[in-house]
Amino acid sequence: MTGGLILAALALGSADVPEATAPSPEAAEVTAEAQDKPAPPPPPRKPAPLSFGPYPPGWQIDFGPGLLAVPEFPGSNGLRILPIPQLDIRYKNQFFASVQTGIGYNLINTRRFRAGPILRPEFGRTTRDIAVFPGLRRINFTVEAGGFVAYQPSLFTTLQLEVRKAVSGHNGTLADLSLRKVALKGKWTLGYGGRIRFADATYFRNYYGVTPAAALTSGLRAYQPGAGLNDVGVSGFVSRRLGGKWNATVFASYSRLIDQAAASPITTSRFGSRNQVSIGAALGYRFRFD
């Protein structure tokens, strides 16, 4: 998200000046002696606290309307539109929460390393999404809980590993290895990166598998994949500060299903595709407070 500028006002008050009087001879001698002595050196300045990046000084909340278009289900060639509000919450360089980044907290927080817990939403697939495949089961919305470790060679470059386990829904375990970069250009913020995703057999069988019973009704061949590499993808966003405290953001991602995900009868059907695209846009208003 775009970083904001904090404007501070400094009020200067004028002091009453007492009426001047002539100095006494003793005071004049002391004054002359003081003028002959060199002035004492100024006290050493305290070093400024180390800053790890353009993080808000307290709470920062961006809120507004947004739309997100995502594949109807993993392996689908169609999109579904989700009216998801733009909600990005940050507290200093500790807590963060948004649809894109999930909900996390930096338990370890140094100049180059961060680590902590993370939660991410997973929207699953509805009965309507897979209506073209009678017999495939729906997968409910769930939360994936896990942890992350991030390495920052520079303030705007992050290499991150996340491992998450779904608490319900697909019930699988995922591991994402990602590289992200951010660039600030005046009122513009640009971000881009890449990701590799691994998944266990439970995730693959729920999203890409076809049981013998489902094969009889869906017209798909039975398929039972195991654990492996799921996809390789890239993503990016552009955000711009508007008038006042408003900002606008557009983002997109592309991933290519590979290996067992690409070989699934769901993916290779006329309703499927190895190419997975997500796009979105949001308008946000920024609140800041301690």
Image: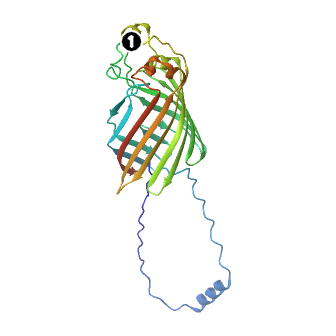
* Furthest residue in direction front, as rendered: 270
Classify residue 267 by image quadrant.
Answer: top left
Of 103 and 132, which appears nearest the observer? Answer: 132
Residue 211 sits above or below residue 26 on the image: above
Q: Mark 1 sits on what residue?
A: 219
Classify residue 8 by image quadrant.
Answer: bottom left
Type of the residue with mark 1: Gly
All told, the count of numbered labels is: 1
Image color mode: rainbow
The residue depicted at 34 percent of the width and 39 percent of the height is 67
Is 44 left, or right, of 207 in this rendering?
A: right
Look at the image and tell me whether residue 138 can be seen: yes
Of 122 and 211, which appears nearest the observer? Answer: 211
The residue depicted at 39 percent of the width and 12 percent of the height is 219
Residue 170 sits above or below residue 255 on the image: above
Residue 101 location (% of width, % of height)? 46, 38
Residue 23 location (% of width, % of height)? 54, 90
Of 208 and 60, which appears nearest the observer? Answer: 208
SS at circle 1: loop
Q: Residues within 10 Å of mark 1 (few under 14, many from 20)?
A: some
Residue 6 location (% of width, % of height)? 43, 58
Residue 213 sits above or below residue 23 on the image: above
Classify residue 179 by image quadrant.
Answer: top right
Look at the image and tell me whether residue 102 can be seen: no
Residue 241 location (% of width, % of height)? 40, 54
